[in-house]
Structures are given as structure tokens and as C-alpha cells.
Amino acid sequence: MTEANPLVIVGAGHAGFQLALALRQNHYDGSIKLVNNEPYAPYQRPPLSKAYLKGDGNLAPLVFRPKAFFSEQRIELIPAKAEAIDRGKKKIRLSAGAELQYGHLVLAVGARNRELRSPHEEGCIHYIRTLAETARLKERLLSARHVTVVGAGFIGLEFASAARLKGLTVDVIELGQRLMERAVTPEISQFFLRRHERSGVNFHFGTEVAG
């Protein structure tokens, strides 16, 4: 793959970073460009709802590798958002209006939160997906007294635990009938339900957010 026709990876999350790393580890010598829609070096997302919320907000433990690593491995980080793909011309259009030619294109964009729309609650609805979102939530927790968590999956429960450690009142709304219903057995759900209830978390099962 030449510099004019690089391998372009859209998405610098775990999958995108790991692909770039694996290519270099397996002696791929072509040009690699990693399109990263965040102003940070690629980082781990799972600790956002745990150690990052509980800690001092230090980014260093989250990053997969320091920025110098990408220069050394000739993995070019491109801080932009990919907005369109022209498959005929093998180009992608970036958010700044520039175009990027590719020889091979990999989409590793992950998933997005389904956002709640509430014009009356501007600034009170938060998400945990990106570092910027979690940083805003972390700041909001300094003055909050009561939080409502939508979803009793892994991330929702991790955040509920972190909020209780900060002394907040926590309610968890879950459409299903038990914790982590799609991922674990009823016995494990019951075990974690007891643990969270003992810590003071309130649960509302079979409940949907209507507004």
C-alpha cells in the first residue's frame, strides 16, 4: 500500500487501534491512517464508567499508547470525522472538507447512544461513551444530589455504583425484568441486585422512560 493509496481505518476505538497495531506487529509496512474523531490519543472506554469517574480525571491510564508510539510505528492519526465515502473514487470526505484517498478502507466506528430528547432538561441528561461526555458528567456529579440511570446493563450499574460511593441518591430504570438480562443468568442477576440494593440503589424493573 503506497502513501497515495493508504490503508485507512475510520474509528480509533479499541477495534481500530488494535487493527493498526496488529498490522504493524505482523510486519505490514504500508501506509496506515487512523481517522480519530476525538482530540485525544486512542483510549480505552470501559474505565470511563469506573476508574475515571471515581478518580482524579487523569487521562494517562486510559490511553492505549502515548502519541509518540504512533509516530514511531508510522500510524498517522487524523483528527477529523469521516462524513462521506465515494467508493468509485476510493475517497472519504472529512469534516473539515478535505478528502482522503484510500487503497483499503476499514470502518471501525462502533455504536452510538440512543439519545433522549427533553428540551426542559437541557444540561441534565448525560451519556457515557466518550471522554468528553464522561468529563462533563464527572463535573456535574460535584453538585448533583440525585441521579436516574436508564438501563441496568454493565455500564449503568457501574455508574450507579460510582454515584453511590459519592453519596448520591440513585434510581435505575430498566425495561427488562432483571439486571443485565441479555448477558447473564438469573442467578447472577439476583446476586448483583442484592449487592446494589444493599448499597442503597433503587431499581424500577419493567419500566420505560416516557418523557
Image (tube, rainbow, N blue to C red):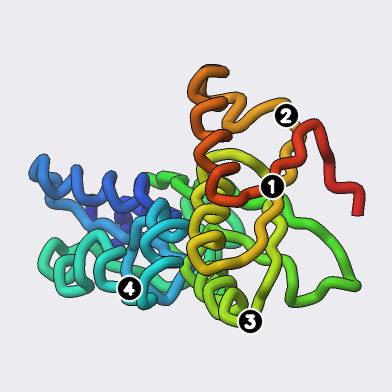
Q: Which residue is drawn at the image coordinates 57% and 34% (left, top)?
A: 193
User: Residue 96 appears at what percent x and percent y?
Assistant: 55, 77
Marks 2 and 3 close (CB-CB < 8 Å): no
Q: Secondary structure at mark 2?
A: loop
Q: Secondary structure at mark 4?
A: loop
Amino acid bearing label 1: Asn
Q: Which residue is drawn at the image coordinates 51% and 68% (left, top)?
A: 166
In terms of sequence position, does the residue under pointer 1 or pointer 2 come before the other? 2
Q: CA distance from mark 2 to mark 3?
A: 31 Å
Closer mark to the observer between disc 1 and disc 2: 1
Q: What residue did someone put label 1 on?
A: 202
Quarter of image, res 205? top right
Closer mark to the observer between disc 4 and disc 3: 3
Q: Which residue is drawn at the image coordinates 53% and 58% (left, top)?
A: 129
Q: Tell me the crowding category of disc 4: few under 14, some 14 to 19, or many 20 or more residues within 10 angstroms, Cα based.
A: few
Q: What residue did someone put label 2 on?
A: 176
Q: Tell me the crowding category of disc 1: few under 14, some 14 to 19, or many 20 or more residues within 10 angstroms, Cα based.
A: some
User: Residue 127 appears at what percent x and percent y?
Assistant: 62, 61
Q: Tell me the crowding category of disc 2: few under 14, some 14 to 19, or many 20 or more residues within 10 angstroms, Cα based.
A: some
- Relative to 71, does residue 31 appear above or below in the rendering? above
Marks 2 and 4 close (CB-CB < 8 Å): no
In terms of sequence position, does the residue under pointer 1 or pointer 4 come before the other? 4
Q: Secondary structure at mark 3?
A: loop
In terms of sequence position, does the residue under pointer 1 or pointer 3 come before the other? 3
Closer mark to the observer between disc 2 and disc 4: 2
Q: What residue did someone put label 3 on?
A: 143
Amino acid bearing label 3: Ser
- Left/right placement of residue 43 relative to residue 152 reads left
